[in-house]
């Protein structure tokens, strides 16, 4: 076999050599995680490295139909591998629950635990067809990929789908030691923002996580250097590698859907006049809260684009979805000022649109990095999990947002007057203009970091060089015969 040349002919579409390195992507089946790992897959295929995206048929399909902003040309190069997954319960979310953690997804998460055996078989098969198998998995899929450790020519990396700030704060809290750096305010406890089931599921991953060869972060050193350094300092072996390669979402949208109603509507609005309102795929608001939000947006007299969708079920293709009611005559009343959308929306394109000047968000990490990269300030309304901590990063540390309601008041109904007030502050005040200016400046530097020669791009290139290194590559023939590497 020839020497490894993948990294020497980056972006050369004509290269059709036998794969020396293949990358296997193993996502957690939740939209924000499927999506980030799809973005990573596209980025890796653009370096002419074969990528295999592995999961249940349902979740692979979900990842493909909800493509936001990715190039169809890149996606066409990804190999999707459906694994047999036992059927799992897919209950609807409970909009009335005061704890907003999406417990309805837990059966789908638990079902992934049965993938260990099929993934082990698959990895062994792939390891006989390539010199090196590189597994990149969600932190919450460490149990499932742990057999990597028994395959001589395979290695695994964790792709972190949350902020370095959140990851660092969780790790330090788990160790029960004080934070080594100053944090602007007391952080919400993890018990308050999660479920016991997900904490147990996370605990299962800790032992197998030790087999990983390194960590990849979907964040940028420009925004999170102190936390990335602290995370790196946790490695006592000195062997663990880490790369901060993000935010990896594209900023040029070759797949932009020109016929999207959202973008058509935005085209008719004035520059930076619109607040985009969306709470992601895991938030289900009560009828009362939706009514207050509707009235608050209306009373603010600011332009708004509101994506009103219920939270995902474990199987997003399964049955009816609750269609939340709006106040009588609402859409007629706000016509020309605001619009309510119930379909899947092209969020990155919306945030990149010149008419968008603010984002009311639950602060899931996907939404945060999209907003950071597009330079849009956030009105933060965290719901669960890492979101309250991301809110601290966005509002207190990066200072590119305002809080809609404090976490300590999470069980109270947020009144229309509160919503009206925060929308006015962000969209129509001197304070809001300053926050927007900071967000725009940060966006410009972060975008630059992910372009050729930028900080995050250099780290990604070094990751590619690392996984395609040829110093200890087995020839394919000996890998096939199961020769031990070490
Ligand atoms: C939530 O509460 C409303 C009344 O406020 C009720 O009509 C609805 O059925 C409840 N939904 C669930 C899923 O419990
Ligand atoms: C484009 O948007 C329209 C309207 O929102 C939708 O019906 C259509 O399926 C979208 N096409 C693609 C390729 O996403």
Image: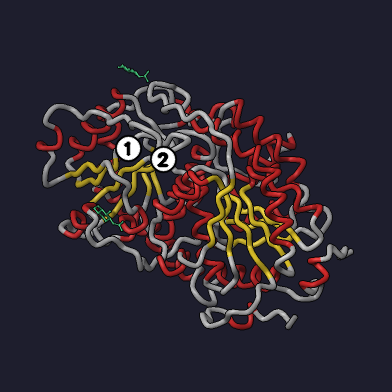
Residue found 57% across the figure and 27% down from its top: 195
Q: Is residue 380 visible?
A: no
Where residue 437 appears, x then y in whole percent? 35, 59
Q: Which of the labelled discs sits on residue 281, or is there none?
A: 2
User: Of the residues under marks 1 and 2, which one precedes in the sequence?
Assistant: 2
Q: Secondary structure at mark 2?
A: loop
Where residue 26 appears, x then y in whole percent? 60, 51
Is residue 277 found left or right of 133 in the rendered image? Answer: left
Residue found 11% across the figure and 43% down from its top: 335
Is residue 423 found left or right of 132 in the rendered image? Answer: left
Indicate which quadrant contains ligand 2: bottom left
Quarter that holds the C terminus: bottom right
Is residue 67 found left or right of 433 in the rendered image? Answer: right
* Observer-nearest of 57 and 437: 57
Q: Residues within 10 Å of mark 1 (few under 14, many from 20)?
A: many
* Observer-nearest of 423 and 456: 456
Where residue 7 appears, x then y in whole percent? 63, 78
Q: Secondary structure at mark 1?
A: loop
Q: How is the image coloured?
A: secondary structure
Q: Residues within 10 Å of mark 2 (few under 14, many from 20)?
A: some
Q: Which of the labelled discs sits on residue 113, or is there none?
A: none
Quarter that holds the N terminus: bottom right
The residue that disc 1 covers is 309
Compared to 338, does 86 lie above or below?
Answer: above
Residue 328, quarter of picture: top left
Where residue 321 appears, x then y in whole percent? 33, 32
Residue found 53% across the figure and 79% down from its top: 11
Compared to 335, does 327 lie above or below?
Answer: above
* Observer-nearest of 419 and 154: 154
Residue found 58% across the figure and 79% down from its top: 16
Do callouts 1 and 2 mark residues in contact (Cβ within 8 Å)?
yes
Q: CA distance from mark 1 to mark 2?
A: 8 Å
């Amino acid at each position: 076999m020839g020497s490894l040349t993948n990294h020497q002919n980056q972006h050369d579409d004509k290269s059709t050599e036998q794969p020396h390195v293949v990358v296997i992507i193993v996502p957690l089946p939740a939209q924000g995680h499927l999506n980030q790992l799809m973005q990573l897959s596209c980025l890796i295929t653009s370096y002419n490295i074969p990528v295999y995206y592995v999961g249940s048929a349902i979740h692979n399909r979900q990842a493909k139909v909800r493509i936001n902003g990715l190039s169809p040309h890149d996606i066409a190069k990804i190999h999707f591998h459906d694994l047999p997954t036992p059927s799992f319960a897919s209950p609807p979310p409970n909009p009335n629950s005061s704890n907003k953690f999406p417990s309805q997804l837990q059966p789908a998460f638990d079902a992934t635990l049965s993938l260990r055996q099929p993934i082990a078989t698959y990895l062994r098969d792939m390891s006989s067809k390539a010199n090196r198998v590189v597994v990149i998995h969600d932190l919450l899929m460490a149990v499932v990929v742990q057999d990597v450790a028994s395959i001589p020519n395979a290695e695994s990396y964790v792709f972190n789908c949350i902020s370095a700030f959140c990851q660092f704060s969780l790790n330090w809290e788990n160790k029960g030691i004080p934070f080594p750096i100053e944090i602007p305010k007391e952080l919400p406890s993890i018990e308050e923002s999660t479920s016991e089931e997900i904490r147990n599921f996370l605990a299962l991953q800790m032992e197998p996580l030790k087999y990983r060869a390194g960590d990849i972060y979907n964040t940028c050193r420009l925004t999170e250097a102190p936390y990335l350094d602290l995370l790196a300092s946790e490695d006592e072996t000195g062997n663990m590698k880490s790369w901060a390669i993000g935010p990896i979402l594209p900023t040029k949208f070759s797949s932009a859907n020109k016929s999207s109603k959202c973008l058509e509507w935005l085209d008719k609005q004035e520059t930076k006049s619109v607040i985009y309102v969306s709470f992601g795929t895991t938030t289900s608001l009560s009828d009362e809260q939706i009514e207050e939000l509707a009235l608050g947006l209306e009373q603010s007299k600011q332009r708004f684009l509101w994506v009103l969708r219920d939270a995902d079920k474990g199987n997003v293709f399964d049955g009816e979805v609750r269609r939340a009611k709006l106040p009588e005559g609402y859409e007629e009343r706000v016509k020309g000022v605001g619009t309510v959308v119930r379909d899947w929306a092209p969020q990155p394109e919306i945030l990149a649109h010149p008419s968008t000047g603010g984002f009311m968000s639950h602060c899931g990490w996907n939404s945060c990095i999209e907003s950071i990269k597009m330079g849009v300030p956030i009105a933060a309304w965290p719901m669960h999990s890492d979101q309250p901590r991301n809110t601290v990063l966005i509002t207190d540390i990066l200072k590119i947002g305002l809080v809609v309601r404090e976490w300590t008041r999470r069980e109270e109904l947020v009144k229309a007057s509160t919503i009206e007030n925060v929308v006015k502050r962000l969209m129509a005040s001197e304070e809001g203009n300053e926050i927007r200016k900071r967000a725009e400046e940060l966006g410009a530097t972060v975008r630059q970091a992910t372009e050729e020669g930028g900080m995050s791009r250099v780290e990604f290139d070094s990751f590619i060089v690392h996984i395609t290194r040829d110093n200890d590559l087995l020839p394919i023939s000996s890998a096939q015969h199961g020769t031990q590497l070490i």
